[in-house]
Image: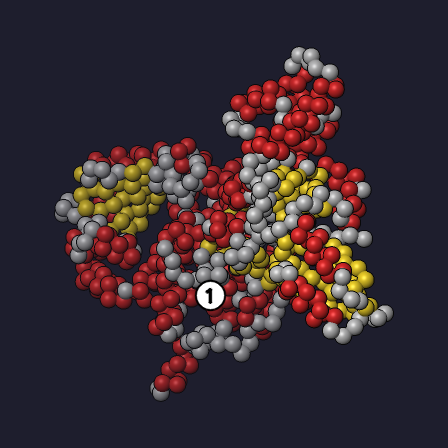
Amino acid sequence: MDKQQEKKNTLLDPDKMFQDLTNKIKENCPGMNLERIKAAYEMARSAHEGQLRKDGSPYVTHCVAAADITVDMGLDEDSVVSALLHDVIEDTSLTHADIAKQFGDAVADIVEGVTKLTRVQYTSKEDEQMENLRKMLMAMSKDIRVILIKIADRLHNMRTMAYQSPEKQRSKSLETMEIYAPIAHRLGMQRAKWELEDLSLQYLDPAGYREITSSLEKKMDELERFMDSVKEKIQTRLDAEGVKSTIYCRIKHVYSIYRKMYAQKLDIDGIFDLCAFRVIVDNIPDCYNVLGIIHDMFNPVPGRFKDYISTPKPNMYQSVHTTVIGSEGIPFEVQIRTWEMHYTAEYGIAAHWKYKMGSGASAVREGDEDKFAWVRRLLENQQESDAQDFLHNLKIDMFADEVFVFSPKGDVINLPAGATPIDFAYNIHSDVGNSMVGAKVNSRIVTYDHVLQNGDIVEIRTSKNAPGPSRDWLNYAKSGSARTKIKQWFKKERREENVIRGREMLEAELKHNGLTLDDAQDTEAIAPILKRFSFSNLEDIYAAIGYGGITATRVANRIRDELRAKPDKKTALDKVSEAAERRETNAKKTGKPVHGILVEGLSNCLVKFSRCCTPVPGDDIIGFITRGQGVSIHRRDCTNCIQLMNQPENQGRWVHVSWADSITDSYVTTITIVSKDRSGLVLDIASMLNSINAKVRSLTARDTGAGLALTTVSLEVKGSGELKYIMGRLAAIPGVSSVVRNGNK
Ligand code: MN
């Protein structure tokens, strides 16, 4: 036979495989609709038509094999159908809709879920990241059957890994070892876990794997003789005691021996319990009965007895374990359990479709509650519904309140459900959050309130010049830590803004009570409040109101109450004059001027000069409290300012400001020269300004089209006197009709 021929003979025949599957279903799952399963097979076969596996077999053989594993796991009809179709969305032109039309939404959703898991990018990471990735995969599988089918898929791929390239063998084995075997373990599926581990080990450490298997082979005769004799001894005794039992024995799986060898730095001869016996009985009392009999027959090894019946493992595993020493001095482990426990141990969560669980399973220890909350929830769910179908409807709600997303580097970040890019950014670092200027999810730009989904890849754009968080962010952030960090930022970085905002809020609140800020400055009224909240001055209170540490209503009410309680001996007139006096002194004691400006009642607040009227010292000025940008200083005769004053909603925002006594700075202001449009005029203006040593910042000229020219000059002056002088000199230039300050009519 030539090689070509040989290869052909080993090729798998999908129709024959499907026939075997059908027979298996007929035998084990009589309730299933075979026509529906056949239809799924037909759909998969035609969709994958022409695609081949690495061994040369038709691709659909993989789908049938995966379905076969789901039958072995004891899953339901929808699972078998979904397993047959599990790769069609990923690898063929069929869509969710195509599947839904023929097989219903449940199947289509499962197949889509498996596809999503397949697309998750895997890179090996440290343990914590791996755990997050596992959780994410589980959370992404809204229906637990998604993950079970994914495990079946992976199991078959690992079984046929021999045909892949060495790199693929390694990477898939690593992924299996780090992701899928632990998930199988977590779901209590020992059988799948062991097989996944042994298959992976074969590729990850071929030499180590061979070392163990070959020495096991050498010992095989001896081990088998030993196992047979022990099994028979136990069986005879149990029969004599009238305990109905089935005994299995096996050599432990390769990876568990491997781990022990490496953990304990032993060679295989040093691993004493290579064999494990399993005694399966009908009920729990018999478990303990058998335990007593075994301990009577053999010497128990101290410290090796474990009772997972009264205290199940987090993955619902139950059994009694003991290690004893046989007559030949060889120790071995005996696991004793009921049939229900046995199926749960072998198939874990998947066993629920077929077998109800024992009542003991709900006995999760109290201390484990948080760690194993998801198990508890599973068990609670189960009590509420029929065990037969509770997993059908089970959405994996173990992570219902969490969402798992990727950073661009592939790190998995765990956030509360409903989280937005803001939560993500602050989760990375508060600096990232504070300097965020944009966000992308799966390469698309999104708004800050975009709700993240499991598996999203989130990218945050930052900038050194970012304005920092806005108060809206507090509404979008879901996680407490993000909210705290945002609040901290406001508290620290925006004190001036907080002060201004808090002052504004308090003033509005006082107004409701018929009071003014002057009342807040009444030391007798404010002192108890300062003391109560440990503030050192009124400005601290403003700041606290501004960042949301205390409400304006609360402060205003306290001020009102204090004032009411205070015996009022003064007349209204006294009050008015007092207030005026206070204003004067306040203005003086307001502390350091900022840019030569004193703002009444506020110190060190952000001050900026309005662009519209560019005030200079000597001008009559007033302050306007802007939203978020401090106090803006206007000239009282500024047209914008007059307009603003007429708006009732802005009434509360005006504040008294004054120029400081000693000013050394220069101030930039802008004037406009109206003149005839004649040649040489700009030059005349420039040389005039030069001759009087004016500090010109900019000079631009344009003609208005009606024989007139407008020249705008920005210049630095010490005060209004100097400015008046310059304007006078400019007005004297021939052809100039007027010189006006900007901001005037
Ligand atoms: Mn597959």
Q: Quadrant of the N terminus?
A: bottom left
Q: Is residue 23 above or below residue 472?
A: below
557 on left or right of 138:
right
Work out whether residue 606 can be spotted: no
Q: Quadrant of residue 211?
A: bottom left
Farthest residue to the right: give it.
706
Label 1 CB sits under 8 Å from any ligand 1 atom: no
For the residue labelled by badge 1, is the local secondary structure a helix, a strand or a loop? helix
Q: Is residue 40 above or below residue 646?
A: below
| Residue corresponding to mark 1 | 65
How many labels were placed on the picture? Answer: 1
Tell me residue 523's x, y (percent).
60, 22
Q: Give 552 or 44, whichever is nearer the viewer.
A: 552
Q: Residue shown at 28%/47% (left/top)?
A: 277
Q: Residue shown at 30%/34% (left/top)?
A: 289
Mark 1 burial class by Cα count in 10 Å: few <14, some 14-19, many 20+? many
Tell me residue 316's x, y (percent).
41, 42
Tell me residue 517's x, y (percent).
67, 29
Q: Is residue 310 above or below residue 97?
A: above
Q: Residue shown at 58%/42% (left/top)?
A: 662
Farthest residue to the bottom: give it.
2
Q: Is residue 4 above or below residue 204?
A: below
542 on left or right of 319:
right
Q: Give 271 or 558, whichever is nearer the viewer.
A: 558
Tell me residue 131's x, y (percent).
41, 51
